Image: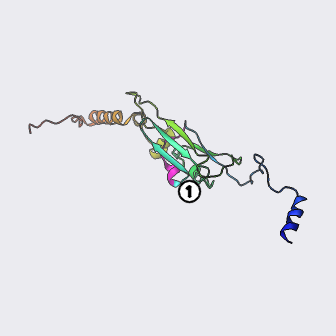
């Protein structure tokens, strides 16, 4: 069939493509785009480390951290969900928005860090379930210490050691005359 005949034949065919935003329903096995719950995330970065497509970046910082996801790079494998220690990730079953270039639909979510219970400065996010997994028999005192910022946690540890062993406070400068 020459090109002219093909063009004429196509005039009488039904359209085989769909106009945006109409799209076919995703296949039953389609896992969908990844979503993150900022109330659960502790910005540990495990999801970014296990993602072979580099679709997730986690950047912890002073006072907050950012979680960035690019569906254009994602293969929807579900590995990040399987490894998140606090179940902060889910996958939507809908197909999601259409996009052209990688990065078009990238989203960044800010995870605000909680206030230290002693000084009020931002502290590393704490997860009760993560601590239970790491230290199943952790005492309540240890759990309280995990909610403090780094400086206050260090001071609390020194206080606890002094109380247990009665030795000098290692944070005090030892003046030996030199
Ligand atoms: S693995 Fe879970 S808790 Fe850790 S950064 Fe990713 S989403 Fe947050
Ligand atoms: S579903 Fe797979 S490819 Fe997509 S962000 Fe998670 S680990 Fe990466």
What residue is at 51 percent from the left and 50 percent from the top? 48
The location of residue 133, given as percent across then percent down, is: 49, 45
Q: In terms of secondary structure, what is the magenta stretch mainly?
A: loop
Q: Which residue has dot 1 on it?
A: 53
User: Residue 58's spot in the image, x, y percent?
Assistant: 49, 46
In the rendered image of this protein, does residue 29 appear above or below residue 112? below
Locate the N terminus by quadrant. bottom right
The image quadrant of residue 176 is top left
- The number of numbered discs placed on residues in the rendered structure image is 1
Q: Is residue 45 magenta?
A: yes
Query: Residue furthest toward the front?
Result: 4
- How many C-alpha atoms fall within 10 Å of the one at disc 1: few (<14), some, or many (≥20)? some
Left or right: residue 154 versus residue 31 is: left
Range covered by the magenta-colored residues: 40-49
Name the quarter where the C terminus is drawn.
top left
- The answer to whether residue 48 is seen in the rendering is yes
Horizontal relation, residue 44 to residue 160: left or right: right
Instruction: State yes or no: residue 9 in magenta.
Output: no
Q: Is residue 17 above or below residue 178?
A: below
Q: List the single residue furthest toward the right.
A: 12
Expressed as whole percent of the image width and height from the top left, the position of residue 57 reads 51, 48
Residue 136 in sight from this viewpoint? no
Looking at the image, the residue that sits furthest to the left is 177
Please tell me which residue is depicted at 47% across the width and 40% down the height of the picture. 65
Q: Position of residue 24 (x, y in %)?
A: 78, 51
Give the residue furthest to the bottom.
1
Quadrant location of residue 29?
A: bottom right
What colour scheme does the image use?
A: rainbow
Mark 1 vs ligand 2: CB below 8 Å: yes
Q: 164 or 106: which is nearer to us?
A: 106
Q: Foreground: 73 or 92?
A: 73
């Amino acid at each position: 069939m020459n090109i002219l005949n093909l063009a004429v034949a196509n005039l009488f065919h039904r359209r085989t493509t769909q106009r945006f935003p109409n799209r076919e329903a995703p296949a039953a096995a389609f896992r969908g785009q990844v979503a993150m719950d900022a109330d659960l995330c502790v910005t540990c970065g495990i999801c970014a480390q296990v993602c072979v497509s580099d679709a997730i970046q986690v950047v912890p910082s002073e006072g907050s951290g950012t979680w960035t996801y690019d569906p254009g790079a994602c293969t929807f494998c579900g590995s990040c969900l399987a490894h998140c220690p606090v179940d902060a990730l889910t996958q939507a079953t809908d197909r999601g928005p259409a996009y052209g270039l990688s990065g078009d639909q990238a989203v960044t979510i800010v995870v605000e860090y909680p206030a230290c219970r002693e000084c009020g400065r931002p502290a590393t996010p704490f997860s009760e379930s993560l601590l239970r997994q790491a230290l199943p028999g952790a005492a309540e005192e240890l759990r309280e210490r995990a909610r403090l910022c780094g400086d206050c946690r260090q001071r609390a540890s020194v206080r606890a050691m002094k109380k247990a062993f009665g030795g000098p406070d290692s944070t005090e400068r030892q003046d030996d005359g030199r």
